Image (cartoon, helix red, strand yellow):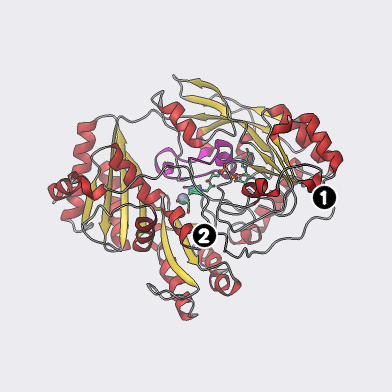
Amino acid sequence: MFALIRSRVMARSRFAGAIPGSKVCTPGASALLRHYHKPSRTASFKTLTKDDLEHFKGILPAETILATPAVGGSSDPIELEGFNADWLNKYRGNSQLVLRPKTTQEVSDILKYCNAQGIAVVPQGGNTGLVGGSVPVHDEVILSLRNMSRVRNYDELSGVLVCDAGCVLEELGNYVGERDHIMPLDLGAKGSCHIGGNVATNAGGIRFLRYGSLHGSVLGLEVVLPDGTILDNLSTLRKDNTGYDLKQLFIGSEGSLGVITGVSVITPQRSSAVNVTVLGVTSYENVQRAFALARKRCGEILSAYEFWDATCMGAVLHHQSLKNPLSAEFPFYVLIETSGSNKDHDDEKMGGLLEELLEEGIVEDGALAQDDSQIARMWTMREGIPESLAKTGATYKYDVSIPIPVLYDIVGDIAKRLESAQLYKPGESGFPVKLVCGYGHIGDGNLHLNIVAEKFEDRVTNIFEPYVYEWVKSHRGSISAEHGVGLMKRDHLEYSKSPEMLAYMKRMKEVFDPKGILNPYKVV
Ligand code: FAD
Ligand code: MLT
Ligand code: ZN
């Protein structure tokens, strides 16, 4: 059976699709109705004046400022469009000023002034966030880190990288790749997202299974607090037990406590032997059985275990011009990656696993990549899902952690609810909801439930909100596994956090940002 897999993948024509570039494009969705609860503007926040703009001109070179005539500048509002709208085209602010500092001192000077004046600020990285955290809600000043993109230091012996927060993840991957290392995280947005944004959201992604959370691989941070104080905690030490580990507070704080300007992160050695296989599976139960066997047979070299359903596959094959590498369509697809240092050993292990999976009837069909371009195409099949869905329509995203055995149940449950409400019929057009599907990092117990609709509207949203959150709570799961809270889940945190924990989160916010100017209306 395994020979069958091998002979099939060797027929290159099965991989004839192009590999799209990894730069994430914001889907063109101008017709989508933006529909969400917008908190009222905090009246005490200052409305920008020409004097404020003049002050910022004293801090930053003119070419790093985008200011519309509304605040005394000359930029066309259209130039600010990409900073005001989020990647999903779901959340939109109305900022008239974008500041793009190049140094930590400039960030400090900006925040010091904003804090003194009561001017609200939203820190922005690559603007690929999926919970409405990276764009203003009203007229907050946008503090974009994209001009801070310098590698400060790289130590090849320890693998510790120190860089500016605005470095693009993929560029860092290329930089350390030339030095035989990899970044400890990887995600579909790598061509646009910044390392500072990754840290601010505590991004998970496809290497989490192997390298764990950024809470482990980030060794130090440089952070500017709302009052302009620079916290230089840019340590390169693996071990440092000198009291409270303050940097951990900023990892996952989504720009609500401070602006991350520098990151120190440990990068793993690059594996010389990488194998990737895509498998066709007939039931979710077998997706789990395959995971258990992959861990048993390949535990020490297993580096990713991802899954997606047939609906996702349909969207990705349609939008990414890829071909299904398997002989038929399946209800579920699994991608397994192994990374190690001994090719013969790893090939044998992967071969043995595939053989056993087929013999046991756990998988029905599979394709094993034969070279780097086939590996890239298989990964595009998985990583291209978010973009493909967003191109299909208004995409509602629920990023949940639930115990693996019941993880996929919620997808069918939501589909049924929508069908009962006559808002959706699988495979049929003409309904307000086009697709209901699931994919994700199953090895981490993390499902991405996506509902793609004609537009964002209450009669659709009300079917699954707060139902999804209640469902997750009843399984002691998390309503945000990796995307964060942002504006989207700010009012739903009680489903995953106790009142006591929420109270301490609010107190923490007050300690760092007593005037509440940093990323207001979000997180807490
Ligand atoms: P932004 O979107 O600009 O900002 C995100 C949040 O961080 C905002 O609250 C913002 O205020 C804050 N922030 C940004 N930079 C700073 C800074 N320097 N200091 C303080 N606060 C800051 N997430 C995952 O976890 N796993 C995935 O696999 C994954 N895949 C994705 C795939 C696609 C196609 C897309 C579009 C998104 C994906 N995401 C994923 C979501 C997203 O969280 C990540 O893309 C990324 O971590 C956000 O980085 P960014 O630089 O774009 O930050
Ligand atoms: C992913 O795993 O692809 C990302 O988290 C993005 C998404 O959920 O759409
Ligand atoms: Zn994800």
Q: What is the magenta range?
A: 191-214
Q: Are marks 1 and 2 in contact (CB under 8 Å)?
A: no
Tag of residue 397: 2
Left of 168 or right of it: where is 260?
right
Marks 1 and 2, how far apart at CA: 31 Å
Based on the picture, tell me whether residue 337 belongs to the magenta stretch.
Answer: no
Based on the picture, tell me whether residue 210 belongs to the magenta stretch.
Answer: yes
Question: Ligand 2 near label 2 (Cβ, under 8 Å)?
Answer: yes
Q: Counting other residues with Cα less than 10 Å from the Cα at mark 1, is it few (<14), some (14-19), or many (20 or more)? A: some
Tag of residue 92: none
Residue 173 position within the rendered picture, expressed as x and y whole percent measured from the top left? 45, 32
Question: Can residue 229 be seen from the camera position used here?
Answer: no
SS state under label 2: strand
Left of 158 or right of it: where is 346?
left
Task: Determine which quarter of the picture holds residue 144.
Answer: top right
- Kindly identify the residue that appears in the image at 84 percent across and 48 percent down: 46
Left of 111 or right of it: where is 222?
left
Nearer-N-terminus badge (1/2): 1
SS state under label 1: loop
Question: Can residue 233 be seen from the camera position used here?
Answer: yes
Residue 193 position within the rendered picture, expressed as x and y whole percent measured from the top left? 53, 41
Residue 521 to residue 303: above or below: below
Looking at the image, which is closer to me, 447 or 434? 434
Looking at the image, which is closer to me, 389 or 179? 389
Looking at the image, which is closer to me, 420 or 168? 168
Residue 90 position within the rendered picture, expressed as x and y whole percent measured from the top left? 59, 59
Type of amino acid at the residue the image marks with label 1: Phe
Q: Which residue, as the protein is rendered here, is positioned at the far right? A: 51
Type of amino acid at the residue the image marks with label 2: Lys
- Kindly identify the residue that appears in the image at 37 percent across and 72 percent down: 427
Residue 388 to residue 370: above or below: below
